[in-house]
Image (cartoon, helix red, strand yellow):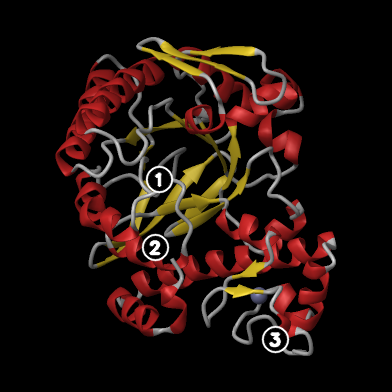
Amino acid sequence: MSLFDCTCEATSGHARALTYETAHGSFQTPMFMPVGTSATVKGVTVGQLNDLKSQVVLANTYHLSLRPGADVVEEAGGVHGFSHYDGPMLTDSGGFQVFSLADTVKLDDDGLTFRSIYDGSKVRWTPETNMAIQEQLGADIAMQLDQCAPYPAEKAFVAKAVDLSAKWARRCLTAHQRADQTLFGIVQGGMHLDLRLDSIRLLREIEDESLAVGGRRFGGFGIGGYSVGEDHEVMFETLGDVARACPEDRPRYLMGVGNPTTLVRAVREGVDMFDCVLPTRTARMGTAFSSAGRMNMRNAKFTRDFGPLDPTCTCPTCQNHSRSYIRHLVKQNEMLGGILLSIHNLHYLLDLMRRAREAVLADSYEEFYGEWMASPAAKDY
Ligand SMILES: [Zn+2]
C-alpha cells in the first residue's frame, strides 16, 4: 500500500468499508472523527483518545493559525508534534469559521479578509495562503478553502458560492505541494441537487486538468453546506444522490455532522467520514448520548441512580461511575463531569461507526440500520 491509497473492502447496499493510508497509519471507515479545534479534543487526553481507538482527529486552521500561529505549530513538528497525537489528522480550511465567527468578513473572488476573533487584527486569506498555512500545520489531510452558503439562501447566491468554491478548488490543488499531505475538494450547492451535481462535475474537471499536467488529484471529497440549520429530512432529500455522484474510489466526508441517527442513515447513503463538536460540546453541557436516547444528566431523577450511565456501554466512564456521581459532578460544575461525559459520548459515536463497519463487512447493513431505526436511540438527531 502506498500513501493515500484507498481500498474498498466491502459494500452493503450503498454503505462502504474503506481503508485509507496516511503517513500516520491507516484509517477504516465508516468513521467518526473527534474534533480538536485548538489541537485538543476538549477535556480528553491523547492517551484517552488512543484508548477509545480514535482514528482521525480534526484540528481547526482558523483557530490554530491565529493562536498560537501556524509558525509555532510548524516549529513544534506540526499538529502531530505539537499535540502529541500520532494518528492521522485532518485540518479544515477555516473558511467556515471565518463566515460563522467573524463579525466582518469581506469576500472577493481572490479570497477573504476578516478580523481575528482574538485581537481584532485584520487577516487576509487566499486559496494559496490557506494552503501554505495548512502545509505548515502538517495534518495528513487538508481541506480546500471554500464558501459555504448559509441556509436558507437564494438559489442564485448558492450557485455563486459553488462557482467560487470551484475556482478556489482549482487554485488550492495547484498551490498544494506537500507530498505527505493530501487535499480534499469540497462539494457545495446547498439543498439544490442540480447545483450539487454541478459542484461535483467541476471538481472532477479540475482534477482531470491537474492530472493531465502531471499534478495530483483530490484525496477525497468533502460534502459541505449541510447541517446548517435545515431539517435533517431536507438534507436526506439530496444526500444520497450527492454522495454517490462523488468518485467511488475515494472517501466521501460529510462535514460537521454528528448526530447518531444521521450517521447511521448517511452511511446507508454511501457516506464514509464524519466530524462534529457535538459529542464533546453536549458533554460539557451535561448531556449524554445513550441507547435510550439523549440524557440530561442535570435531571433530579438521577440523584440516587447508582447504575451506570448506559448499561450497554463499555466505555471507562460507564465501567467506573454511576449516574448519581456524574449528575453530582455536572451540577457542581466540576470539570471531571464534562470530561467523563466527553469520553462516553466519543466512545458512543466511535463504537457506533465500528459496528456499522462490521455490518458492512458482513453485508448486513440493512439489518443494522433496521435495528437502529427501531431502537429508542433512533430519535436522537
Ligand atoms: Zn459509556
What crowding class fits label 3: few (fewer than 14 Cα within 10 Å), some (14-19), or many (20 or more)?
A: few
Coordinates of residue 47 in the picture (x, y in percent): 76, 56
SS at mark 1? loop
The earlier-in-sequence mark between 1 and 3 is 1
**In this rendering, would 199 be left or right of 319?**
left
- Position of the N terminus, as image quadrant, is top left
**Residue type at the position of mark 3:** Lys
SS at mark 2? helix
Residue in front for this viewpoint, 13 or 95: 95
The earlier-in-sequence mark between 1 and 2 is 1
Q: CA distance from mark 1 to mark 2?
A: 14 Å
Coordinates of residue 216 in the picture (x, y in percent): 35, 24
Residue under label 2, please give it: 262
Q: CA distance from mark 2 to mark 3?
A: 28 Å
To which quarter of the image does residue 12 belong?
bottom left
Coordinates of residue 112 in the picture (x, y in percent): 47, 16
